[in-house]
Amino acid sequence: MSGTARCSLLAALACSAFACEVRPTSGGLVEQARLGVFFGGQIQQREEVPRVLDGSQVQGFRIVFREPLVESKRVRWELVLPPKSGAAEVRVEKLGEITVPVGQREVDQVLGFEPGDPLGLWNIRVLVDDELVIDRAWLVFDAAARRQAEDSDKGATAPR
């Protein structure tokens, strides 16, 4: 399978996985839960995110509660990553947990990329206490490799 075909397949899988995003229940504790890239005080939900290691891009999730918390809440998350190249099919997992203090109405959790993090389809599950508020996949890609592949595709189709 060519690199372009593999990328298209992964993108299609990622798009189909977005149908699994969990909507907080009406009347529940959580008003909104979003995964994406932080930008200008907002969080932009994206289907694909370039793997950037220099800190110029910040991604993660935001949880907005319906009202300020009257008791602290535990937020747990699990990242399921694709296997690193050449590795067995065992999926790498990253686990995290924070406690949101009383009085807070919103919490942001940054999920930074680390050297060696694999490219491909990532999935995250976020729970507030025991309520699943995010279950979502997104494609992590190498921007430089993608540009190079697009440039070589353009060169191959350009008239001579």
Image: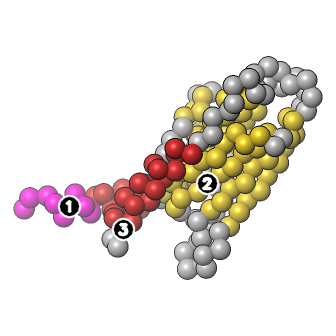
x, y (%) of residue 44? Answer: 54, 34
**Residue at the location (70% across, 39% down)?**
133
* Sequence-earlier tag: 3 or 1: 3
Q: Which colour assignment does the render follow? A: secondary structure
Looking at the image, how many numbered discs can be counted on the residues? Answer: 3
Per the rendering, the mark at residue 64 is none
In the image, the segment drawn in magenta is 152-160
Per the rendering, the mark at residue 123 is 2
Residue beneath disc 1: 155
- Please say whether residue 49 is visible from this viewpoint: no
Q: Is residue 46 above or below residue 50?
A: above
Q: What amino acid does circle 2 point to?
A: Asn
- Please say whether residue 19 is visible from this viewpoint: yes
**Residue at the location (77% across, 56% down)?**
95
72 vs 105, left or right, is right
For the C terminus, the quadrant is bottom left
**Label 3 Cα crowd, 10 Å radius (few <14 / some 14-19 / many 20+):** few
**Residue at the location (72% across, 54% down)?**
78
**Residue at the location (69% across, 49% down)?**
125
Asked whether the residues under the numbered discs 3 and 1 touch, taking CB atoms below 8 Å apart as contact, a structural biologist would say: no
* Sequence-earlier tag: 2 or 3: 3
Q: What amino acid does circle 1 point to?
A: Gly
x, y (%) of residue 120? Answer: 52, 61
53 vs 77, left or right, is left
Of tags 3 and 1, the one toward the viewer is 3
Disc 2 secondary structure class = strand
Secondary structure predominantly adopted by residues drawn in magenta: helix
Disc 1 secondary structure class = helix
* Sequence-earlier tag: 2 or 1: 2
140 vs 35, left or right, is left
115 or 69, which is in the foreground?
69
Residue beneath disc 3: 3
